[in-house]
Image (spheres, rainbow, N blue to C red):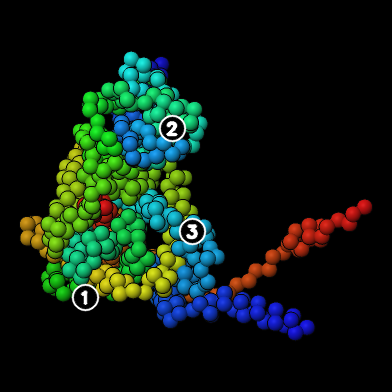
Amino acid sequence: MGNFFDFIIEHLAQFLQFTAFANMTVGHVIMICVGLVFIYLAIAKEFEPMLLIPIGFGILVGNVAFAPGYQIGVYESGSVLNYLYFGVLQGIYPPLIFLGIGAMTDFSALISNPKLILIGAAAQLGIFGAYCLALALGFSPTEAGAIAIIGGADGPTAIFLSSKLAPDLMGAIAIAAYSYMALVPVIQPPVMKLLTNSKERLIRMKPPRAVSKTEKVIFAIAGMLLTTFIVPSGLPLLGMLFFGNLLKESGVTKRLADTAKGPMIDIVTILIGLTVGASTQATTFLTMKSIGIFALGAASFVVATFGGVMFVKIINLFLKEGNKINPLIGNAGVSAVPDSARVSQVVGLEYDKTNHLLMHAMGPNVAGVIGSAVAAGIMLSFLA
Amino acid sequence: MQRSIKCFLSGIAVLILIVAGARIARAQNASDLKLNEILVLNDSNSVDDFGMHTAWIEIFNSAYNTVNIGGCYLTDDLSNPTKYWIPTGDPATQIPSRNYIVFWADNQPTRGIFHLNFDLKNSRTIALFNADGKTLVDKVDLPSEHKPDVTYGRPTNESTEWVYLEKSTPGANNDYTKKKSAGESFVEFDPYGIGMTMIAMFVVFSALSMLFIIYKNMGRFFIRRATSSNKPATSAVSTSVKHSEEEMSGEVNAAIAMALYMYQSEFHDEENTVLTIHKVSRNYSPWSSKIYTLRKSPR
């Protein structure tokens, strides 16, 4: 009988060793709290819930401490999470998300006023500003490139580039990119207000003209060819973006477009969010580098907003009265679609209740998607 | 009829383009294989799987995909291109991307598929032929004199020049010197990232400027076309319709869209607080059926 109890106690003790309680560290607790904050922000504040719920829950999943060697964690070969994480590691999910983004994006605002494209280019200054800062802080060139892309305000692009340049930092970069995208309404308005005067904020822009279907179809094809001929390394992202857009604009592949912008992008968003969240295991995530990445991410958003707004102010010097652009849409050059365009609208309405900037801001906003993918391609060509 | 002829001609044109393209495009197959390193006199160099010091030939797969060398031919006599047929169907003949494979030139083909039926004692040329036995994939002329244990090969994978190598590297890269990564090289010349910023911003602006220029001009073209095609119709349009079009500017649309969005968001929030439970009227379900959950008793 005594032997039996010894046996039971021994196995119970062994079982306890396998529980998360026995393997828990302070780091895991901190990360679980971070995950809970993400979920709170998503549900209570509605900050990017589509992203923050999967990522937040993924953080919880990734930080349930377990005894290694049982094919459980995202980093353990052969585990289910590891298989799902493969799509992140190999850069499979981001192009699929771009396909969906292409299928749901209307480039009309951009086509009707092509000079807004250039604002999307100017806002990429955030990426390269962050690159310089990251180098100054002692990050290696590839790490600096991967971190810098946070300034593009594009989660899939950030994941794609970091999977190629600095896979070790991917979790932190993705979390920073998505967090700051959710915080666009907090980060951008002060910079926009600081850089503009009351007269500029009241500029009224001409309503965009109607764009024909032919123009939209040509845009999808010409856009892909032009951008990828210049930066072929951006092909996975840009090719899929414009392909998705062609599915939408051709008008004859409605079913494919609906799938790309509906079930497919939803599935991929779930997988990418959950696995990126799960990749933030405390043991690999809680480092000084991660803190640096978060600081640089915030700085890059500020620089990107600065670049976009200042560029509009500069080109306004050369534009005739009546053709001027409201600099409050400069912030929309980052590719957080449509959050940054909404910020332009909201800030614009603060100064003039009848001046609606949303449609104008969508132009640089979608140009920002193209711009950040091009910038990622350049980083890849130079640093990989 | 005319439409069918047009379709047929278009099909032919596409076919011609595809065939021409396939010939021009660099396919990633056996044509990507390269003779890479050769050791003629093996006194104390690598030993084969029988422990013998024999001459060897290394082949490099320069493609970015796996290439199967099975079915190709190795020879030291151009007049006999099919001298040694590399057997097919063996997984060992699959050369992974940017990887290497070594053949032992010992004139002992019975020792395995990587043992050739010739040696290199009197060879002046080594060639690799495609599976058709006619298409030359790669060839190298060997020098008349060889030093023992010194290999003859390409100094780097991409090199077209052949030299005596300081170090023999069977099954590995001939270029063993430490290399800086692209990023490290870039930072060496641009430690603060200013150059990168300038170049990259220039490229981003160039790419998007091209789009801008094209679309600015294309927009003009489409506006002109729309204006010219609308002219006769304009007179027919009543004043009231014109008025309504003018009134419904993009800004108004944006305002309506925004208002709808905000209204729907708020509505959604309120709705979320209401918990509704509908009773499912179906009483029967396979989940509760004993037919599906219990085994039949054996007879």
Tell me the kind of residue under disc 2. Phe
Residue A290 screen position, x and y as percent: 32, 71
Indicate the chain on which mark 2 is placed: B
| Mark 1 or mark 3: whose residue is earlier in sequence | 3
Q: Viewer-nearest of labels 1 and 3?
A: 3
Q: Which sits in the foreground, B245 or B184? A: B184
Give the Cα distance between marks 1 and 3.
46 Å
Frontmost of labels 3 and 2 is 2
Q: Position of residue B103 (x, y in %)?
A: 39, 33
Q: Are marks 3 and 2 in contact (CB under 8 Å)?
A: no
Q: Quadrant of residue B292?
A: bottom right
Q: Residues within 10 Å of mark 2 (few under 14, many from 20)?
A: many
Q: Which residue is mark 1?
A: A190
Up-down relation of residue A289 to residue B104 (above or below): below
Give the chain letter at badge 3: A
**Considering the numbered disc 1 on the image, is that residue within a helix, a strand or a loop?**
helix
Q: Does residue B21 appear anywhere in the picture?
A: no
